[in-house]
Structure formats: C-alpha cells, structure tokens
Amino acid sequence: MSFDLILPFLRPIEPLLLDESISEIMGNPDASWWYERDGIMRREESISFDAGKLRTGLEVIANQLGKKLDEDNPVLNAQLPDGSRLAAVIPPVVRPSPALTIRKFTSRHYTVDDLIARGTLTRSLADFLAEQIRSGKTLLISGGTGTGKTTTLAVIRSAAESQGYQVEGFAPTSRAARQLNEAGVHAGTLQGFLARGSNPDAHEQKHFYFVDESSLASTNQMREFLARIGANSDRVLLIGDIRQHQGVEAGRPFEQLQEAGMRTAKLDEIVRQKDPTLKSAVELLATGQVPAALDALQQHGRVKEIPNREDRVRTIAKNYVESPENTLIVSPDNASRRELNIAVRQELKANGTLALEDHKFGVLVQPQDMTGADRSWASHYEINDIVRYARGSKAIGIGTAAYGSVVAIDPAANLLTVEKGAGELATYDPRRLTGVCVYREMEREFSVGDRIQFTAPDKALGVANRDLAVIQSIAPDGRVTARLDNNRQIEFNANNHRHFDHGYAVTSHSAQGLTAERVLVHADTSVHPDLLNSRFAYVSIYRASHEATLFTDDMAKLGPQLGAEVSKASALEISPSSSVAQGIALGL
C-alpha cells in the first residue's frame, strides 16, 4: 500500500500508516489516537497532533482528491489511490479536534497457508480443495459473505491458473460480477453470457468458470449454462448461500444440488462481524437458532418494540440521522422502504444536510409482487407498464436492451401490445420472451445531498445494480452529478436515465451483498410471511459489521415470524447424472 498523497500532511501518524499489520487508524475529537491490529483496538499514547495542523492537512488532502472540506462541507468520505478509505469530520460538527478514520486496503496476496493461519481454511479443507482442482471435478461452494470467501476465491483462481485453466466468472447480478472481478476473476453477468450465444472457438482452451450468487440463478439459467460449456475440459465452481434470498425466477438449483446429498465440507468461520454480540447473533441465525439470536441482541438493547407505525418509522429515521455515515436501513417491503426514505429526508432537511429545493423526476420501479413466472402472463401486467427487453426479439422487431410501454392487454389470448420507441406497436405472447424486466413509473423528489441507489446496471455510467451514490448537483435541464461510494464522480440526465431511487432504506433483497458498519432493521410483523422470515433476518443482520438494531411492532410475533422457513417449490429438477450433480459440495 502507498500513502504518498496523504503522508506529507499526516506525519505524526506516519508510523501507524506504514505499519502493514495495522488495518485501521482512528483519531478522536478529544485528540486521542487508536489503531486496530488483528481485530483488537489499542490506544497509541505517543501521538501528539496539533488540531489546527490536522485540520489544515485534511483540507489539503480533500482538495487533492477533488473534494471540499470546510465549515460548509464539514464531512469528508474519500477513497485513496490504493483503495484505502478515509473519513474525516471537522468543527463545528465535532470539537475540539477533527475526527479522522483511515481504513487500509491491503495489497497482500494471500496464500493457502495465510488462509489457514487466519482461520479461514483448515488444512484438511485446503488439501481437499487442491485435490479437486487437480482432479478436475466440479465444485460447489456454499457460504455467505463475511466468511473470507473473496480471499479464498482468489487463492482458488491462482491454483486453477497454475493448472493451465483460463478462469472466467459470471453472476446473476452485476454487483456480484464486480465482486468476482475484485477477487481477480474476469467476470460478467450470467444473463449476458447466455444472451451472446455460443462461441465455438472458446472450446479450444480449457476453462474454469466461477458462478457467484448461484442461489439467485434459475433452473433454466443453470441448465442453459451447463449445456453451453465444454463437457470434457471445462470446469465449474458454483458459489452461493442457501440461507440468503432465492432468485425471482423458477427453480432453486443450488439448493437442490445440496439436498441431493452431495458430500459437504464446511468452513463457517465468520470474519465480517467485529462486535462479539453481533457475531454471536449471526452465527446463531446461520444455524437457524432465531430465538437465541434475538435474545442475544435484546440483552444488549438491540431490539426495540414500537407498536405505532408512524412512531417506529420516525424513530428509525432519527436514529439514522444521528450517525448516517456507513449506516444502512433494511426493510421487508417497498411500501415501508418508501416511508422510511421520506422520513429520513425530512430529518436531513430539518438539520440542513439536504438542500431545501426539491427536483421531481419520474423513476422506474420494479413491482415487488411480480415474479419471474408472472411476467409470462398478460394478466399480471398493467397499462403503462414499462418493459425492458434484455435480449430483444427479431421476430417481433424489438432490439436488445430496448424499452416498450404496455398499451393493450388481452388476458384471454395471453397477448400484450407494447408501443416501441418510434411509436410502432408490437403484439406478442409474453411466454415467448425471456430476459424481460417490468417497471412502473413513480414520481420522486430529489435534492442536492440526497443518497441514491441505482436500480439497474449501466455500462456507459460504469454503475452496477444497487450501487450507492450522493447527489452533488442538479441542473435545470435534469443533469445530475453524483459521487459513488468508491469516490468516482458520474453525470447523467435524470430525464433519460430513470433507474435510480432514494438509497437510505433498501429492501433485504436489495441489501444482499452490501456491507455497512451499522444496520437498522425494520421488522414489521404485519407484512406477508414471504417478506419477513428467516431469510430476511439472516440477510439483514448479516449486512452489519459492527452494530445491528431491530425495530418491531410486536415482540411476541417477531420470533416466530423470523423463525419461519420460506423456500420456493421447484417444478424443474436437475438431472442427477449431470456433471454438476456428480460434483463435490464444499460449504464455505
């Protein structure tokens, strides 16, 4: 790692910056300095940093990173060139000294021995993995984020490449594909791979394919993928977590493979959660012990009962605003998510964080109650629904990634009529098309300073589905400038790019794959059991690294509802004789 940009202005903490065994550095407003090494916080008594010089240094650093840090902009969140994160707050928000946190990004390349030493792998499992890669068997890895999975995948990638494989990755979501890229695996979406057709030349080289978030893939997608790859030389590593949410399409192939009795070796050491109580709760949730997990959280004041819905939403919003940095709200349904976003915006406007002027834009929102199977039937559509065709169709004259607006519905004949971009009409049976997304237009108000979430990937902007950003400016013609969480600035016209929404509160489906230091969970027991259940509890609380708090309307109902198991039925099965069904299951 390199801190050349910030070292000249932070000389008093230079020893901490250059010590590679230190993962995080914290300077408090009381002028005390702390550091984290091997997960343990320690105070460094020898550091003396003049408050004025520290503030001046931080202002210069902000300027070099293309940001502002002054009395009008007293909070700085930035990514350094090496990937490390820097957060700073200056007076008058804090007193008397500025507050500073630097979370280092390690450039170290881990080996198998490193993973064993840190408890991510056991020696027997490492030997087992190596043998499977050498023997060319298909692998199935089951395990959630926060278990050292990304680091482990990087090691597996290196081992596969050493055996002469060309490694390539896929995932059902653009965000998961990007996480594979971060593990050093060249990756794209599974849907994109299936849409571009087969490539005969690809079989000349033997491939090792990684498929992340496999639990979100449908049975049809998995069948088509396995039929596409080379049967003799290509190998597949399927990665997923049966405890998280399943995909909206039909089938649950990843679960079925494990239920079929595959031999499973487990690596379940959780490394994300830093707080012992939170880590204990996550471990209990992972093994289905929901009452015990709730008891552990409740004993530490992390479960709050507020029967009145308005009071509960207001309390969550106020709690968020008290410490918004690296905080996420998770709610089970879109209606409560919308209420929470409105409530948070009201609080932020009241304390001056958001600009007073609102700008209204029409955004595209996916109906939460419309499943993949529903999209095959005209009766589930509404007039003015916006349909996006990921694959397109030459037969009905719809291009790839084109949009259409529903203008007529014939449920009896199962026919839809859509108006295409040029005003032309196309009528078709929705069962004939795959790769279709359906949206409804909703009006939203946005202000400078608003936190937003992108709801669809955009290659031109370089954003993935569910990426988060903060609006920096809004022009009269609808041009929006925003800064992503990775500190990259983007610009788009909100009248044309309509796949974004407020990003303070998200549903648990949208939260899957995210990480935040602090998570506020809205657990309303009045929603449908399909929305509030064991998967919701596991996914929501698993997002937090340091602190998670649940807000519910009824403590008596909360335990039984979060303990309910909800899994999809599958009318499609994967053949036991398939190459994947004969593979080895490795639980990570």
Image: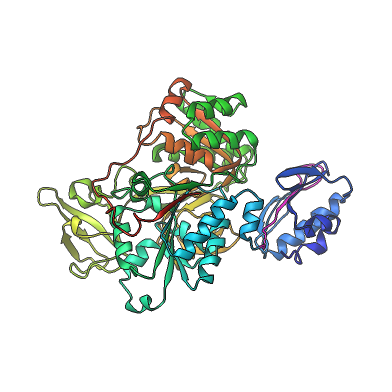
Horizontally, residue 340 falls left or right of residue 488, namely left
Tell whether position 44 is magenta.
no
Is residue 98 within the magenta segment?
yes
Q: Position of residue 102 (x, y in %)?
A: 72, 53
Q: As displayed, is residue 57 above or below residue 530?
A: below
* Residue that extends furthest to the top in the rendered view of this protein: 556
**Residue 391 shows up from this direction:** yes
Q: Nearer the viewer, residue 226 or 411?
A: 226
Is any part of residue 472 visible from this angle? no
Which residue: 21% across, 59% down?
A: 418
* Highlighted range, magenta: 91-108
Nearer to us in this view, 308 or 119? 119
> Left or right: where does residue 1 sit relative to residue 366?
right
Dominant SS type (magenta): loop
Q: Going by the image, does 462 lie left or right of 320? A: left
In the image, residue 422 lies at what x, y percent? 25, 68
Report the residue at 48% width, 63% height from top.
133
Q: Looking at this view, is 449 or 4 the one in front?
A: 4
Task: Spot the residue most to the left.
Answer: 412
Could you say where residue 556 lies in the image, as x and y percent from the top left?
Answer: 45, 20
- Which of 139 and 441 lies nearest the eye of the viewer? 139
Q: Is residue 199 above or below residue 223?
A: below
The image shows residue 572 at horizontal and vertical percentages of 24, 49
